[in-house]
Amino acid sequence: MNTREFIEAALKEDIGGGDYSTLACIAPSTRGRAVLKIKEAGLLAGVALAQDIFHYLEPEATFTIYKQDSEAVQPGEIAFEVTACVHTILQAERLVLNCMQRMSGIATLTRTYTDAVTGYKARILDTRKTTPLFRMCEKEAVRIGGGTNHRMGLYDMVMLKDNHIDFCGGIEQAITTTIDYLKSNNLPLKIEVETRNIDDVRRVLATGGIDRIMLDNYTPTQMAEAVALIDGRYETEASGGITLDNIQEYAATGVDLISVGALTHHAVSLDLSLKAQLS
């Protein structure tokens, strides 16, 4: 789903047959002005999407940006101003706020995690733990917050997790079968393999042919041992049970990537409001 398709679907969900509250009492020719006010400190995200939403409804709308995506904001500041038909402003209001509040919350939390690993080589990754049909925006918010996107979906990278490995009959079989499948179907996809212990890591290393090893639910001590054993032959990813309280311990192991599902499923929306007046 691209941005335009998302906006079309989201507006259809909200407006349905018509915004009758507005249609009933405001003349279509009435023009107005609205400003996006910041009510809580954080990192701003979704300004570009908000502009796209307003221009989808009214290409001639005037959209003036005062705060860009990824800028730190404080209560009382204004992110943007829009001048348009009042019908446009009222139809766009809730969608713009829903998207920007959610995206800004994700960006703010992501920045907290990326700041926590400053000085280490580890990069912060998101996951597929996203809101259905809103993944594109949530992953954009992660990027705005300084994080790195993992795969977008099941189609752009192979990840052999515990269920795949168990159903397939073991790590070696899962890897070799996958390599053969990708070759026969001419699919240039990277392969990541989940491991649950040091023995799994040894089996992956002995089999080879992959790109990244996930170290799932390891303690920092176990992870340091695994990273040393892998010794740079493949990318390493820490996953499972990682919080702001322990993330520096994991980063200190030398792991390349740290995936954090909380970036999207634990983020709290940032408080924003859209204030309108007649122009």
Image (tube, rainbow, N blue to C red):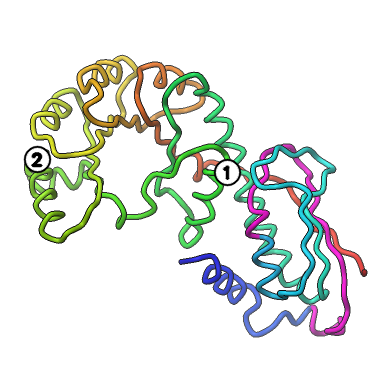
Residue located at (81% from left, 40% from top): 75
| Residue 20 colored in magenta in the image | no
Q: Is residue 205 left or right of residue 101?
A: left
Where is residue 118 shown, x and y percent of the image? 52, 22
Separation of residues labelled 1 and 2 (CA atoms): 38 Å
Q: Amino acid at mark 1?
A: Ile
- For label 2, count other residues whose C-alpha is less than 10 Å away and answer few (under 14), some (14-19) or many (20+): some
Which mark is nearer the camera, 1 or 2? 1
Query: Relative to 279, is 123 above or below?
Result: above
Q: Which residue is mark 2?
A: 170
Q: Is residue 241 left or right of residue 54?
A: left
Residue located at (36% from left, 48% from top): 151
Q: Is residue 274 left or right of residue 165?
A: right
Q: Which residue is mark 1?
A: 144
Residue located at (43% from left, 38% from top): 125
Where is residue 240 shown, x and y percent of the image? 36, 32
